[in-house]
Image (cartoon, rainbow, N blue to C red):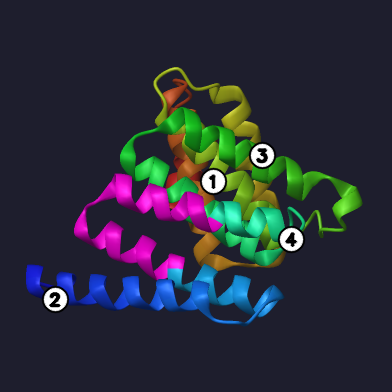
Amino acid sequence: LNRNQYDVAERHMHRCLANLRRFRIEGEDKSTSIFEALGLYVNLRMSQGDLSGAVTFAEEAYNLVVDAYDPVHPQVQEAAGWLINCLIEQGDYPNAERFSEQTYSNLRDVKNGMDQEGEQVAECAYNLADVIFRQDDGDLIKAEGLARESLRIRTRLHCSHSVGSSCILLARLLKKQGEFGDETKELFER
């Protein structure tokens, strides 16, 4: 998109968000509509390279749904993912790790009723491991354990693309720790 197209999209999204906030719809319908509009704003800002703007809208989306729903609600998980991705792109790894850790803890809390062997848990473990890996002073042992958990779950679920991502991350973690053995080689080849 060129600058003019971004400006037009910006005006349309601004009007959409303003109208949604004024409409007399209430409850989950209103939250969902505003949430979806904020998600579009996050994508627009990211595509413009405006990372701080993307973080602002991602935080607003997260705060909207975290107040309205319980921590494992799909929209809370989606908003957390947007925020974590924005923070990673911005290079704010400590905050990305904090949100990833919080999201992972919510999913791992058995009283929330989440399938502990499901893709959501595997994805969250992968994301947390990835954030830790990206930091110069990250806890690589913790990241390795999370990557192994992600790989174990995804292998059991037979998610071929996701298994590949988990393999590569685990191999990169092992390599960063100086472990160049057969397991690392096998993971890179998988």
Q: Earlier in the sequence, mark 3 or mark 1?
A: 3
Question: Looking at the rendering, which quadrant does residue 185 occupy?
Answer: top left
Question: Looking at the rendering, which quadrant does residue 103 occupy?
Answer: top right
Q: In the rendered image, which residue does mark 3 sit on? A: 102
Which element carries disc 3, helix, strand or loop?
A: helix
Between label 4 and label 3, give the one nearer the viewer.
Answer: 4
- 3D distance between C-alphas at marks 3 and 1: 12 Å
- 3D distance between C-alphas at marks 4 and 3: 15 Å
Which is more toward the observer, 11 or 61? 11
Identify residue type, mark 3. Answer: Gln
Return the x and y of residue 161 as percentages of the image width and height. 50, 65
Q: Measuring 51% from the left and 48% from the top, which residue is drawn there?
A: 167
Question: Looking at the rendering, which quadrant does residue 43 occupy?
Answer: bottom left
- 3D distance between C-alphas at marks 4 and 2: 35 Å
Q: Is residue 114 left or right of residue 155?
A: right
Identify residue type, mark 1. Answer: Asn
Q: In the rendered image, which residue does mark 2 sit on? A: 5
